[in-house]
Image (cartoon, helix red, strand yellow):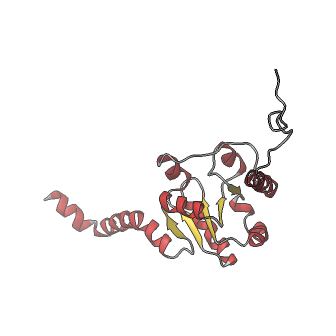
Amino acid sequence: MEFLDFLIKNWMLVIVFVGSGALLFLWPQIQNRFSPAAGVSTLEATKLINAGGTIVLDVRDAPAYAEGHLGRAINIPLAELRGKLHELRKKSPKNILVYCDRGQKSLSSAKILAELNTPIHNLQGGLMAWKEAGLPVEKNAEKNTEKNEERAAEKTAAKKAGKTQGKPSEKANGKSKK
């Protein structure tokens, strides 16, 4: 009976308590509904990456990127994103897959990326969800810049053409050490 009396006397407090709890639960769904980015799972993100034509964009800061990132990810911190939209526009991607640590910064970046008029996909749960799914993470201290992408494209083209990097092997020349 005392509990019921407390609820009746403090009905406004109860409404605030229940309302704030409901918003904590519903806020991510509300935010996703009004975001220009479609939320994607790790499986859907993998499909987008494998389909080709998708830019993988990491909006975390450079030290976090160096500690681990998705393969082929380009690092443009959220604070620098608006100033570097022209670089992304030049690439004319089919899709942009954007991520951060947990998915909140990348959701904010989607509003900026919407200016590109390209489908934007936000990795739900960010890099943490990617790691929890047991998917690979690359670690390096060097940013994945256009030069790195060009080098990777050259290596891929060389492999397809059957060429090797560096000196030709002695076996390829018909010589062998005895």
Image location (x, y in percent) of residue 62: 72, 50
Q: Position of residue 142 (x, y in %)?
A: 76, 46
Q: Picture coordinates of residue 176 (x, y %)?
A: 82, 28
Most extreme residue toward the top is 178
Report how many numbered discs are placed on residues in the image.
0
Horizontal arrangement in the rendering, residue 14 relative to residue 27 (left or right): left
Q: Residue at x 47, y 49 (%)?
A: 133
The one of 57 and 8 positioned closer to us in this rendering: 57
Q: In the figure, residue 154 lies in which quadrant?
A: bottom right
Q: Position of residue 9 (x, y in %)?
A: 25, 66
Quick check: 114 above or below 143? below
Tell me where residue 50 sits by quadrant. Answer: bottom right
Instruction: Report the front residue among 173 and 63.
Output: 173
Please tell me whether residue 167 is drawn above or below residue 117 in the rendered image.
Answer: above
The quadrant holding residue 51 is: bottom right
User: Image check: 35 left or right of 111?
Assistant: left
In the image, is 107 to the left or to the right of 55?
Answer: left
Quarter of the figure with the N terminus: bottom left
Q: Residue at x 52, y 48 (%)?
A: 135
Q: Residue at x 18, y 63 (%)?
A: 5
Quarter of the figure with the C terminus: top right
